[in-house]
Amino acid sequence: MKNKITAIFIIAIVAVMTTSCSDKPVPVTEVPAACQTFVNQYFPGKAISYAEKDLSWFSYKYEVTLADGTHVEFDTDNVWHKIESPMMGVPVAAMPAPVTTYLNTSHPGIQVKKIEKERYGYDVELINEIELKLNEQGVLMEMDD
């Protein structure tokens, strides 16, 4: 019994140590080409000022911060998972078509502060602090103002 408790304790310590060391800064040159292409396409003229590779047990993701403060997270497939641009707003062209269609119809002219992919669809926060949950087809599921 004592050996089982000791083994569980050691496993827990190893797990905490490996997850606490999972975020590591990387040179911009190590950011995958697909991520750099996304940044260059949707944020032209905005350089990556900081990059980080987040490691988990079976995957990794990259997070980049641009010179203007925009933050983009990429998943293991190097596809954006979250874009946050509180000062400039998320570019319309970077968002999925169903999301932009809904926003153009229901919130015209209001910039997106943050968009994040979720299991159900998208979590969108507008500059005016309204939070929206949209499914993958761009249908409003919930709104919080």
Image (cartoon, grey):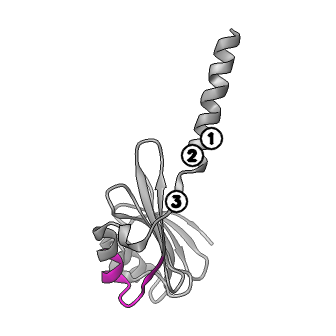
**Label 2: how many residues lie within 10 Å, few (<14), some (14-19) or many (20+)?**
few
Q: Which residue sits at x=63%, y=72%?
A: 145
Where is residue 103 drawn, in percent x and y? 42, 78
Q: Are marks 1 and 2 in contact (CB under 8 Å)?
A: yes
Q: Is residue 113 left or right of residue 61?
A: right
* Magenta range: 38-49
> Residue 16 magenta-drawn?
no
> Disc 3 residue type?
Lys
Camera-side residue of 126 and 108: 126
Where is residue 142 drawn, in percent x and y? 53, 62
Camera-side residue of 17 and 73: 17
Distance from disc 1 to disc 3, alpha carbons, whole Å, reads 16 Å
Q: Is residue 40 left or right of residue 12?
A: left
> How many marks are shown on the rendered structure?
3
Mark sitting earlier along the chain (1/3)? 1
Distance from disc 1 to disc 2, alpha carbons, whole Å, reads 5 Å
Q: Which residue carries the number 2 mark?
A: 19
Please determine whether, in this image, residue 2 is positioned above or below residue 119: above
Camera-side residue of 7 and 98: 7
Q: Which residue carries the number 1 mark?
A: 16
Q: Is residue 144 left or right of residue 40?
A: right
> Residue 39 magenta-drawn?
yes
Q: Which residue sits at x=36%, y=60%?
A: 136
Residue farthest toward the top in the current orientation of the protein = 1
Residue 121 visible (yes or no):
no
Where is residue 2 drawn, in percent x and y? 71, 11
Q: Which residue carries the number 3 mark?
A: 24
